Amino acid sequence: MNQEALKKIKTIIPLERIFTELAELYSYSYDASFGEYLPEIVIQPKNASEISELVKLANEYLIPIYPRGAGTSLSGGPLPVKGGMVLDMTQFNEKLVIDRENLLAIVSPGVITGDLHKKAEEVGLFYPPDPSSSHVATIGGNISENSSGPKGLKYGTTKEYVIGLEVVTPLGDIIRTGGKTVKNVTGYDITRLIVGSEGTLGIVTEVIVRLIPKPQARKTLLAHFAHLLDSGHAITSILSAGILPSAIELMDNACIRAVESFSPSGLPVDADSIIIVEVDGHPAAIDEEIKQCAKMCRNSGATYVKVAETESERLKIWSARKMVSPAITQMGPTKISEDATVPRSKIPAMMERLNRIRDKYKLNLVVFGHAGDGNLHPNIITDKRNIEEMKKVELAVSEIFEAAIELGGTLSGEHGIGTLKSPYMEMELGKSGLYMMKKIKEAWDPNNILNPGKIFPEKDQKRVVFV
């Protein structure tokens, strides 16, 4: 760190919110993905003015800045790949205002998303985006990565709910986009451009999100299948029948066994897959819908179907699903988590492709995810010390993305691009599409200060490298 720049930083931020000791820096060198990069300094800003001054200083001394929430990113979004300054936004968390009359919330970026859920539900409202990490992830991080979760099937992703932002630009200006109105068509939609930009176009300092009335009731079923493809057909049958569940989740046999080994829940270890279907809305309507879903599961070959009769039975079903991520980490020291997404009708075809990739490379590849919206999570459990196997993982990951794109899908449904998917961007966007995104980045951030090394591939980079 340039000592002159460090001296100026100390005039902007109190010393107790500046970290430069090696042990402290290591705490910010990783996230929930793959890779480790040491920053030069970590700062905990608490307001937009502080961030504005830091960004202006970073432009003066050409210091990279990496905004960071709780570090739950699965794509490497906050990793300080080029050193520089990490902004830990978790202390910027004072504002959480629910505006019941206007059906919206005004939130600081460091607020935990789960706290927003609780505050909204206390007054009968609902904020649908619900990533698995919502009990620790920040709303600012969710906005940067355009996160989603099981309810994305019916309610969409974070971008569907963000209607206004306060943002510090890459040159240090403080701007507002959108506002409190549901309708706003004034000029370019910069709000949508910022959401999902992974901290490369601005640092979010205040958020206005839309809330909706909390559903009156919900019903959940669990179905077992002897064949994975049958569960795929059940999902497409439900969706093509005109029913829109709030969630459809899938777990393959490896996930089932991992959960039963980690925290026994009574799941069928001999089943090839299970699906969880949840519908919400008016009580009379969802009673009929859940019966139809159960019937279609049986017609598709389900060997067992159970509709939860009580809230405790419903929670028990979901607790098994929530155990998947911690359970599969017990299968090996290194987890490569992807979220390649395909059109709903292509779910069975994507499952077949994943099976072939698993057999071809003989990898411990498990599949779970939000199958209702085509957002599967193929996870490869491996050991980064096994160089030969990691080389096979690199090839397998490339083939997973090739399969998703060939089936009309996308690289990411909710995790973002970060460092782990940037080599494949041209595969989805083409040269011209990627060029247009680069021009936007260059126009906004001429000094490439904000979160460099993300989204865009390095020169001649065609594949993610794990070894």
Image (spheres, helix red, strand yellow):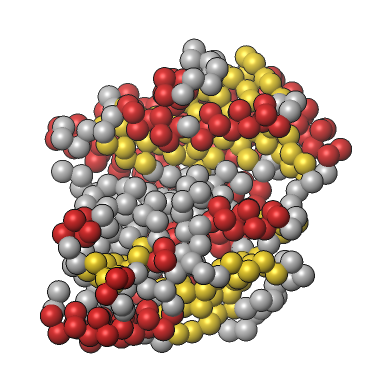
**Please, is residue 349 above or below residue 256 in the view?**
below
**Please, is residue 193 above or below residue 187 in the view?**
above
Residue 429: image x %, image y %? 40, 60
Left or right: residue 392 compared with residue 119: left
Quadrant of residue 38 in the image?
bottom left
Residue 246 visible in the shown view:
yes
**Please, is residue 352 above or below residue 50 in the view?**
above
Left or right: residue 63 compared with residue 225: left
**Please, is residue 337 above or below residue 76 in the view?**
above
Left or right: residue 25 compared with residue 45: left
Residue 54: image x %, image y %? 31, 81
Identity of the residue drawn at 24% across and 41% down: 394
Residue lying furthest front: 16
Quadrant of residue 301 in the image?
top right
Residue 243 visible in the shown view:
no
Residue 181: image x %, image y %? 69, 76
Identity of the residue drawn at 67% across and 26% down: 313
